[in-house]
Amino acid sequence: MNSLRGHFLLTSDGHSTAPASPASAAPARCETLTRLAFADERLKLEVDLSTLKATWFRSGTRSLLFWGVRHQTVASDRTFELQQLLDGLPRQPEETLRALKGAWVLLFADSASGQFVIATDRAATRAPCYATLADRLVFGLSAQDVVEQDPSLRAIRPQALYDYLYFHVIPAPATVFAGVRRLLPAEYLYVDRHEIRQGHYWQPDYHEFGDDTGRQPSAAHFLQLLQASVGAELQEGKVGAFLSGGTDSSTIAGMLGKITGVPANTYSIGFDAAGFDEMAYARIAARHFGTAHHEYYITPDDLVTSIPEVAAAYDQPFGNSSALPAFYCARLAQSDGVTKLLGGDGGDELFGGNTRYAKQKIFDVYRGVPQWVTREIVEPSLLRYAFTQRIPFVKKARSYVEQARVPMPARLETYNLLTRIGLERIFEPDFLAVVDIDDVSRQQADYYERCTSSSLVNRMLHFDWKFTLADNDLPKVVGSCDLAGVAVGFPMLNEALVEFANRLPVAWKLKGLRLRFFFKEALRDFLPSEIIAKKKHGFGLPFGLWLASHERLKRLAFGSLESLRTRGIVRQDFFDDVLHSRLKDHATYYGELVWTLMMLELWFQAHAPAYRFAR
């Protein structure tokens, strides 16, 4: 595994916690670093870089360190541009950060004034973490980097474990460790001698009705932006693209070949399992664009080999099962000599590509019905009497009303597995007593309400910008690529493309119930018709299906759950219920729960083997 680490310590008395490093006398600027260490009166910095390029610049008492800044955004006189950043960050941090492009993490330090700025890009492609202690601020590129600096920070937070089992990830700003926080998209942390404050330098600005430009000119402009976005991610070395056969990855692969003028290197993962394999669509795209296509079919034995490795690679429990296919795809590319892979992540969160957008639009119709009709006629008729649950058509109407009554965004969790089963049946009473089960709803509602738009679709897009993209999909792909030793870029997250999408009329994103209407219409002459028409699938993993038939995989999963049952989180009898009853009857449905529990235990074994919940 290629590690990616960095931290600084800020002491309250202004003295470094370690002797000055010889690297403090390094040249004013260093590029393509693999290791960096330097210290001065207020700053100790150690960095171990292997998959990102770093730019380090010093001018007097001010220091600036970038991870992953996009090369094309740096002027030919790079020293001049970096000097502008050094001058702007102390005075106008938000305006200065807003001008930065690409996927990056930034650390600014001025040892004379005691000013520090930590920030991440608009999508939090890599979200740095920090902790504020009594005498210092601790910073890292991961939660693990932070806790390695102080043993007191290793305490596991029970609320985070509950959040993980609810969301399958731990949403920012929290982490699994008590006191360690993670930056949100477009967030920065500012420190000086008087205060520590957080702020946002950018927030999506949605235009409800868009501009007056017609759809055809907008489509032409979109294609130009898309081509420029892919071009901006190119670098020295061999560049390839994930290819799942969906609209996003197919578009990126096609654009990559168009820009370079040679067949794009594309990489796909398949599963020998009915209903899960999407390789046919990847092959359609590969033939259409003439790519140099590479395939790998994952087997249950592959899962047995790699699940513990992937679980341990993340800085905190991570339960997105698509991380395994993403890892195998990145490893396939790396073995082919690829140094950077391009992913299509972000398209759904810009152009309205998730099926729940259409589903929630249907539910939202109910909220437009006069309240006297819903409260005095509809709801008493459908919800008051138990027999309405036994009549097929009426049962569906009742279910619709029950869900439609729930306000957004809580309505998105109507079918959350934890609440469907029942929290009391899953968790140990002592564990459940110390967590706030309503906090997950507050987290979602707080971010949902930050959206400046009043339309349902834009508010869901804004919501997914964090909870789906920054908390889930980007860590999945970035973590998988780090583990495989290959860099990754996301052209769909290009700033110009994001701003363009946010200005589109709402009706162009979801036209009636047609997902990604503008996106697909604009690409109709570029993508194969089969891919335009296909339903979204992604890297779905047939874990539950294989779990029922593969003995080694079953031993790994069941053994992990047997170990997890000793940690005081989940009820003993619930393990028995899942393993010996529910899983047999509904392997795919409950396989998801087994996966998240298994990944939690394997993360414990790698990072906190002695953990036991104690009230």
Image (tube, rainbow, N blue to C red):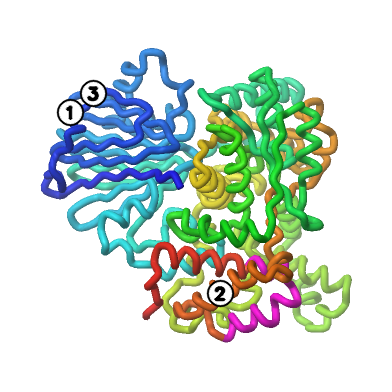
Q: Earlier in the sequence, mark 2 or mark 3?
A: 3
| Region in magenta | 573-592
Q: Secondary structure at mark 2?
A: helix
**Residue 134 placement: quadrant:** bottom left
In the image, taking residue 389 as reference, residue 186 lies left or right, namely: left
Q: Which residue is mark 3?
A: 27
Query: Residue at left 23%, top 57%?
Result: 133
**Residue 159 placement: quadrant:** bottom left
Query: Residue at left 58%, top 48%?
Result: 327
Q: Look at the image and tell me whether residue 386 can be seen.
A: yes
Could you tell me residue 289's position as x and y percent? Answer: 76, 27
Amino acid type at mark 2: Gly
Could you tell me residue 331's position as x and y percent? Answer: 58, 43
Amino acid type at mark 3: Pro
Query: Residue at left 42%, top 76%?
Result: 434
Could you tell me residue 86's position as x and y percent? Answer: 28, 26
Which residue is at the front of the view, 559 or 94?
Answer: 559
Q: Magenta segment: does it hold 582?
A: yes
Which residue is at the front of the view, 126 or 587?
Answer: 587
Please state, as top left, top right, bottom left or bottom right, where the C terminus lies in the image: bottom left
Residue 25 - label: 1
**Cα distance between the residues tagged 1 and 3:** 7 Å
Q: Which residue is mark 2?
A: 559
Could you tell me residue 279's position as x and y percent? Answer: 77, 44
Helix, strand or loop for the magenta stretch, by majority: helix
